[in-house]
Amino acid sequence: MIALFAHAGGLSGRSDLPIPEWLFGWAAAMVLVISFVALAVLWPEAKLEGDRWRPLPGVLGRIPASRAVEIICGAIGAALLGIVIYTGLRGTQSPAANFAPTFVFVIFWIGLVPVSVLFGDVLRAFNPWRAIGRAVGWAAGRVVSAGLPAPLAYPERVGHWPATIGVFAFAVLELVISGGDKPETVAIATLVYSALTFIAMALYGVEDWSARGEAYSVYFNLFSRISPFETRDRVLGVRPPLSGLAHLKVGAGTVPLLAVMIGSVTFDGAGEAPIWTGIAPDISKFFEDVGLSPQPAFELTFLVGLTAAILLVYGFYRLGVLGARSVGGGFSAERLSRAFAHSLVPIALAYVMAHYVTYLLFRGQAIVFLASDPLGDGSDLFGTAKEQIDYGLIGATATWYWQVAFVVAGHVAALTLAHDRALALYEDAKLAVRSQYWMLAVMVGFTSLALWLLSQANT
């Protein structure tokens, strides 16, 4: 499981911090309160709602988003998909010595998050399922003289629910299933997901399914909306950071998706905390008492814990929404829930980066020698098979500071988005500020939870 690696290189040896951990929590909460006051005073009108995208001049805007570059990137993505499946099925079944688990769980799932935030929706260009779907559609259109039937209209009521289910399934593979990081399991899961994705693309169209139903496209697109870069009509342009989130179309399943994103990392962080290690054996024993063998009982226990963490996050957000509704304005709870959902994305980013930063920095280095020996059979294709992971890349104290910085910055960004949306939603600016008292409480709560989870890695 990924959690075992994440904590292995995490926060141990942090006893030399110049101030106690609880003081970090109070300081982080004060930063949020001060930011809230500053926004109320210095941000009197909505600034992120308007369209301020500008194309980059000349070749800077045209070449990165050109069809040729898209084809090359798509071919690379398809090749990597094939490598993951092949190495997972044919290579050694040691997760640490096989290319597939490290690439999927580290380079793809974690590494693509900061890349998306910095450079925009990179996955859209490299997405192997989109590339293969478009290539098959193009080839079929050339072969079938009468033309292919038009795809079905994507149902509005379905919204982001398929993506929510897909991200939840990935979290189950990562955190619940024993041996979920076994290369063969990773390869089979990839094959199953690919088959389901291609069927859905055939039914609803490649672009519609990629934009709304395909789990990884939707997941990384949410993070890419923080980025100052966006491509429109094959032209790369810039926009104010965070403004892409202000234009997120929230539909059915969007809020549950964000709850899964935050809740799954929350559960992973709590996996070694006393609050979970104290009750997990009792839950597992209960399942054994009703007839399950130890391994299914263990997996079901972790499934219950994962689901509970997601429901906790969802319930906490809904509590903030109900509180905001109580100040007036005539908006329904559902309207407010969708209106402020985009403010959860920076929180999801903060949780991912804070919790997995050391895992990415350390375990991510393994891709250098795994690329030379992807099957784990002693090959040395690029002369890097003997490289080692440098665990001195970042110290424990520096890690803690970076983690706190991620948490605070993410929640300040969330406050900014919520404040900007409130100004656009409410006619009365004072009412808009009062509605955000509850959202401030939500942000402080999420910040405190994140810092507490990080501190548990050293208990």
Image (cartoon, grey):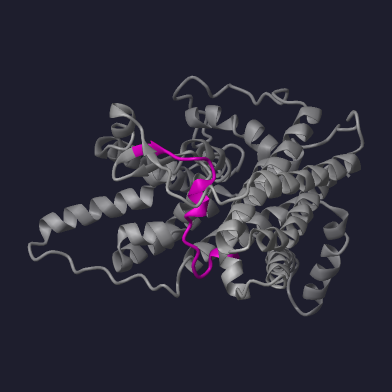
Residue 250 coordinates in the image, percent (x, y): 50, 63
Say which residue appears at 49% left-offset and 31% top-offset.
371
Q: Is residue 361 above or below residue 120?
A: above
Work out whether residue 371 or residue 264 is closer to the camera in this orientation and state it.
264
Residue at the far top: name it: 383
Residue 438 coordinates in the image, percent (x, y): 74, 62
Residue 349 coordinates in the image, percent (x, y): 62, 46
Range of magenta residues: 236-256
Quadrant of the rendering where the C terminus is positioned: top right
Q: Give the left or right position of residue 6, taking residue 223 as reference.
A: right
- Which of the 4 image quadrants contains residue 264? bottom right
Residue 227 coordinates in the image, percent (x, y): 50, 40
Q: Is residue 65 above or below residue 252?
A: above
- Which of the 4 image quadrants contains residue 390? top right
Say which residue appears at 47% left-offset and 50% top-offset.
221
The question of residue 422 being in magenta is answered with no
Work out whether residue 439 or residue 344 is closer to the camera in this orientation and state it.
439
Say which residue appears at 32% left-offset and 33% top-offset.
61
Work out whether residue 405 or residue 385 is closer to the camera in this orientation and state it.
405
Work out whether residue 331 or residue 120 is closer to the camera in this orientation and state it.
331
Q: Give the left or right position of residue 441, taking residue 218 as reference.
A: right
Q: Is residue 440 visible?
A: yes
Q: Can residue 173 be seen in this view?
A: no
Say which residue appears at 60% left-offset and 51% top-offset.
417
